[in-house]
Image (spheres, grey):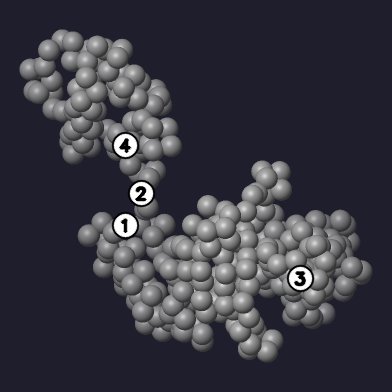
Amino acid sequence: MSTSKLDRESPDKISRILSLYTKLRDGRCIHAAEEAACHNVTIRSIQRDIKDIQEFLQYRQDEELEPLAYTVVYDRRQKGYVLKNIEAVTFSNSEILAICKILLDSRAFTKPEMTAMLDKLVTNCVAAENQDIIRELIKNEAFHYIEPHHKTVFIDKLWTIGQAIKNHQCIEITYKRSKDKKFVTRKLQPAAIMFSEYYFYLTAFIDDKDLQQHFDVINDSFPTIYRVDRIASLTVLPETFRVLYADRFQEGEFRKRVQFMYGGRLKRIRFIYTGPDVEAILDRLPTAIIEKKDGKAYTISAEVFGDGINMWLRSQGKNIQLLNE
């Protein structure tokens, strides 16, 4: 709302708008019904006041009268209006460039999918005058992008699985196993979607007691891992399952301890590292702890799931001496 418009408003409305604006600047949430009752006006009047405040903030931004750009938005979680820093809720050019580079390096999608995603990111999140610069910086890498060999379009499955996880619904999948290329059917309780080393994975608990008897770990409290691109068919079932808060699966903690997305028993490994960059080891193994440093030799321990860690240990050659498991 411009200052000239403010001059024409009644004293009551001006006082009401200033009250709302002060609350917003103080970080409070404005609930239209409560404010309407407080000021003895209609909810529509409060909504018009909010619109006037939005116009005023836009005017301040256009005239460059504010060091930071703000707007009023409706927060669905709080069910009210809050003041937001526009710069905090939009991506900077540097952030979009970083996201594009990470996407390209992931090699997670087919080339048409990747091209479309990059174009949407740049078109919708970068100011028009900077779009050509971003496109130029990613052009060569995008042109030489190598899509995964499976060439499978699966992105819609991620959303379907995500909804099943949120609603605690069982799913049934037809899955192509890697060891013998045979298709198997599984009824699952989906727990999480994860990404690692070019692929998206579904972590889920098998909802079949007879099948579980053939597992290496009977009554395993940790999920089985499935590559999403190998899921040939996916059906969300009406059947639901209960998840107690105390027993909920925490993918963040699981991800720290799993290497190359191989499941298995939880175990602790210890080794001596004599390579050039111990930080790379700590980044690769988030649960790693340096127990002792002796010159250039580091004694390190870490908690991991399964045997996937063995692949990585072998790849380090003479830089790692395994002490025990």
Secondary structure, mark 2, is loop
Question: Which structural element holds mark 1?
Answer: helix
Foreground label between 1 and 4: 4
Pointer 1 residue = 125
Quadrant of the rendered structure where residue 74 is? top left
Picture quadrant where residue 253 is located: bottom right
- Residue 56 % position (x, y): 20, 30
Q: Which marked residue is nearer to the observer: mark 4 or mark 3? A: 3
Q: Earlier in the sequence, mark 1 or mark 3?
A: 1
- In the image, is 103 to the left or to the right of 290? left
Q: Residues within 10 Å of mark 2 (few under 14, many from 20)?
A: few
Which numbered disc, 1 or 4, marks the residue that appears first in the sequence? 4
Q: Nearer the viewer, residue 82 or 42?
A: 42
Instruction: Check disc 3: other Cα within 10 Å, few if <14, some if 14-19, many if 20+.
Output: few
Question: Which residue is rendered at x = 63% and y = 61% of the image?
Answer: 189
Mark 1 to mark 4 CA distance (whole Å): 18 Å
Q: Rounded to the nearest whole Å, what is the CA distance between mark 3 and mark 2? A: 50 Å
Can residue 217 be seen by looking at this rendering? yes
* Residue depicted at 51% across the width and 69% down the height: 235
The residue that disc 4 covers is 73
Mark before the other along the chain sequence, 1 or 2: 2
Give the Cα distance between marks 1 and 2.
Answer: 7 Å
Residue kind at label 1, given as amino acid type: Cys
Q: Are marks 1 and 2 in contact (CB under 8 Å)?
A: yes
Q: Amino acid at mark 3?
A: Asp
Instruction: Specify whether 179 is left or right of 144.
Output: right
Asked whether the residues under the numbered discs 3 and 2 touch, taking CB atoms below 8 Å apart as contact, a structural biologist would say no
Can you give x and y, in whole percent of width and height, for residue 325 in the image? 89, 68
User: In this figure, which residue is indicated by the disc labeled 3?
Assistant: 210
Distance from Cα at disc 4 to Cα at disc 2: 13 Å
Q: Which is in the foreground here, disc 3 or disc 2?
A: 3
Residue 300 vertical position relative to residue 46 in the rendered view, above or below = below
